[in-house]
Image (cartoon, grey):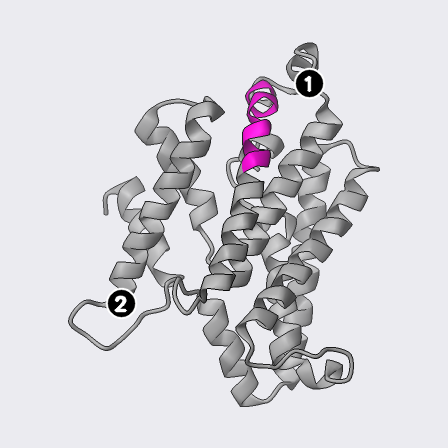
Amino acid sequence: MQTLFRNPLAGPFVLGISSGASLGAALLIMGASLFSGFIGFSLFDDVALAMASSMGSFLVLLMVLTVSTRVKDTMTLLIVGLMFGSITAAIVSVLSYFTEAEKLKQYIYWSFGSLGNLSWPQLGILCFCVAVGGLLSVISIKPLNGLLLGENYAQSLGINLKKSRYLIIVATGLLAGAITAFAGPIAFIGLAVPHLTRQIFQTIDHRVLIPAVLFCGAILMLLCDIISQIPGSNTVLPINAIPVFLVHRSLFGC
């Protein structure tokens, strides 16, 4: 996302994909009574929650892809993604206002994020989504390296910009949507890890960055999970609160 939009602040949340996943989860948890006649999932079914959040993320992705067919400027598409994210956040806020306290509490716990409580079938689905998204990312390495020097340079290399943009957006939607569905909307990692990786490896070559970001992101999340468990205590902190502190320490040393 940072390469495609040429914006260092771009991340998985930039297209509203994670916000769409949160909307899907909110509709299932806080608005289940409105759809009880149309869906056959149990409110407390983890698989249903994962499916709902995935459907929400891909619904937002579909809308963004529809807009992208008419918008050629990537910065405009960035703004459209932020608008979709704001719309979904507004809907979640309305649902939160009218929902019961117990259902609101369940949604808030999901929004904290967690790396546990997954069954083997869920892990299988997640691994499949990550594998497909990773494959699309590998296919996009050459276009991404070309885009580092601008769209005109990428076109001079024979890169189909429209097709490449579709591949990059779909890969991002698949990866961010699936992970948000199963682990919750864990923010900040997608924004900070690429910058940390560039500092560590001193390169902008995506042949190095893509696998490096994969492993650095996984290591950082496992470290955050260990810290959130507070060894020696029964208290478990929200995992969303840990990455900001760790990355701040890494970047600024304070």
Residue 106 at x, y = what percent?
A: 50, 80
The tag on residue 242 is none
Residue 192 at x, y = what percent?
A: 42, 43
Does residue 12 appear in the picture of this structure?
A: yes
Specify the quadrant that holds the N terminus. Answer: top right
Asked whether 187 falls inside the magenta stretch, the response is no
State the residue lying farthest toward the top: 156
Looking at the rendered structure, the secondary structure element under dot 1 is loop
Does residue 185 appear in the picture of this structure?
A: no
The magenta region covers 135-146
The reply, left or right, for residue 24 in relation to residue 248 is right
Does 94 appear above or below 22? below
Kindly identify which residue carries mark 1.
159
**Which residue is located at x 53 percent, y 43 percent?**
131
Amino acid marked by disc 2 = Gln
The answer for how far apart the CA atoms under marks 2 and 1 are is 46 Å
**Which residue is located at x 35 percent, y 54 percent?**
243
**Which residue is located at x 52 percent, y 88 percent?**
102
Looking at the rendered structure, the secondary structure element under dot 2 is helix
In front: 26, or 74?
26
Residue 89 at x, y = what percent?
A: 64, 65
Q: Earlier in the sequence, mark 2 or mark 1?
A: 1
The reply, left or right, for residue 163 in relation to residue 227 is right
Kindly identify which residue carries mark 2.
229
The reply, left or right, for residue 231 in relation to residue 170 is left
Amino acid marked by disc 1 = Ile
Residue 56 at x, y = what percent?
A: 67, 61
